[in-house]
Image (spheres, coloured by chain):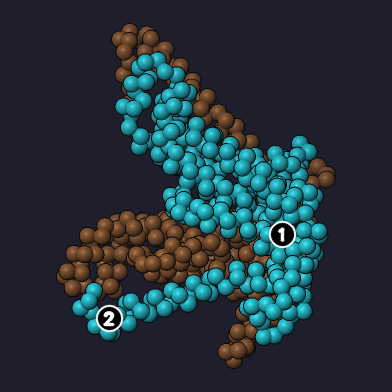
Amino acid sequence: MSQRTANPSGDSIRKARKRDALSGYAFIAPYFAALFFMMVYPILNGLYISFHEWDILGVPDFTGIENYHRLFTDSVFWSSLRNTLEFTALSVPLLIILGLLVALALNESFRGRSVFRGIFFFPYLLSISVATTIWIWLLQNRYGLLNYYLREFGIAAPDWLNSTTWAMPAIVITTLWWTMGFNLIIFLAGLQDIPEQLYEAARIDGANPWHCFRHITLPGLRRIFRFVIIMQVIASLKIFGQVYIMTEGGPFGSTRVLSMYLYEQAFTYFRMGYASAVGYVFLVIVMILTFVQWKIMGAEERD
Amino acid sequence: MGGNGFKYNLVFVWLPKLALIVLAVLWAAPVVWMFVSSIKPEAAIFTLPPSWIPRNVTFEHYQDAMQAAQIFRWFLNSAIVTVVATALTLVLNAMAGYAFARIDFPLKNLLFVMVLATIMVPVETIIIPLYLQFDAFGLLNSYTALILPRLALPLGVFLLRQFFLGMPRELEEAAFVDGCSRFRLFWTVALPLAKPSMAALGIFSFIGTWNDFLWPLISTSTSRMYTLTVGIATLQGFYGTDYGMLMASAFIASLPVLIVFLLFQQHIVQGVAATGIKG
């Protein structure tokens, strides 16, 4: 794009352009300083550290790909990966389906609509430690509210956070309560972008709400769906705070997820090189899963 | 809608409404229960059946919370870090976003691809090198460590670039011809137009920084430098079964959020919807 200039002389245009280009660099310089020192350099340095054995105190000892090699035979790493994928597989569908259903129910005007929206969205604004503190108390085995009502309904209530079977579902429930409101808001925004005339026309043709949902709402939300699913999968893969605060990965490692494993390796055992390798494998997993989803859902979009 | 039969209304109107109300009650209950538990005497907390309306009200848990924990210090830390990080994020991202959208300079596209590429990088991947880096400079347990890493997040650059790309060029060209400097152009013409996008990004950055957990947990080790999120999390370890005190702390920590939310619900919801990526 060329700038129109009042002065016709080519020389001064060139000069102005050059000065403008310089101001371009000046504009991006502050951000790029942050980007370089807080992102790019750590990314490269992380790779470098991952090729070393290093306990933070001594000198990094170059071991080549030994850390990565060890990862693949480390059963704790594999179980952490399995737990991470289990959490993702449980939480993503629940968070998305419930978020969509509530968004559909809230996508018409009625009195108190914004109160409902507020109730569902508010937990998202609470910090992870407040959300988990509340849920640890709710899930308490004997005096917790949840188990009290379960027993009232004659259901055998588990000791959630101390059970290898139920600790993960408890973390999923807590996460569902904490972040469902976010997906709800995104879906609501998407629903409001679907032209009202489409529904009106369909209703005149005698379509019932299910038909409208199937043939207008779902196709209209396709882009939003792709976006929400990809973002939700990444967010779920990165789960850390819930596990760290509620179970510390226990009982018996049944909720130890990848980020928890990385944290333990780095800050409990001070294996900086090994933990960096975990971080890099983590990056690759996130990228592969995102790429695969992009491919699958991108293909769907073309039909 | 008048012509629809009973069955239609039952399936498509009443049942969804009923389900919505039940779900809303379930969603509100934990927060209400937190508050109720925080004002019950110790004995009443461990009484079955649990009562939603306490017979005796006490504020002893709040006194405990304020004495035992440095809640106000943590609150102050969180406030400083969040305000400074958000303000700097807005300035840095607006400038970079503007340059990528409106100024021609060599290597621009390559540099922008570099920014985009970092969107995918999870914080877990860089957390160890970052820790070592701040440790080497003796900057752990500092506001600097809590603030700086947040400034590199690429989302805002991407968002504001999108906004500035959509801004009509004519607005600037007249001023440019008059010899207006780029900075004045940015400051007096472009930035005022970007207010809604900046507000959305600001809200998003605010929520993300206020609730950030992993990095503050790693980069601080002395209680005085904890953020509210980290501080509240450590209480769990020290006062594991003192639920009254834990609920009082949690309530104190969520009160400012609740007030801000009640005042600005519309803006917050729109801001989150506009930026729309999980932090």
Element carrying mark 1: helix
Which chain corresponds to the colour cyan?
A: B
- Amino acid on which the number 1 mark rests in the picture: Ile
Q: Which chain letter matches label 1?
A: B
Query: Is residue B106 or residue A101 the one in the foreground?
Result: A101
Kind of residue sitting beneath label 2: Tyr
As helix, strand or loop, the secondary structure at mark 2 comes to helix
Q: Residue at x 70, y 69 (%)?
A: B38
Q: Residue furthest front?
A: B56
Quadrant in the picture for residue B2: bottom left
A30 over A137 or under it: above or below: above
> On residue B232, which mark appears?
1
Residue A288: assigned label: none
- Numbered circle sitting on residue B8: 2
User: Chain A's shade in the image?
Assistant: brown
Q: Residue shown at 44%/16% (left/top)? A: A18
Q: How many marks?
A: 2
Bin the neighbour count of mark 1 within 10 Å (Cα to Cα): few under 14, some 14-19, many 20 and up: many
* Image quarter of residue B140: top right
Q: Is residue A35 left or right of residue A276?
A: left
| Percent x, y of residue B274 | 43, 49
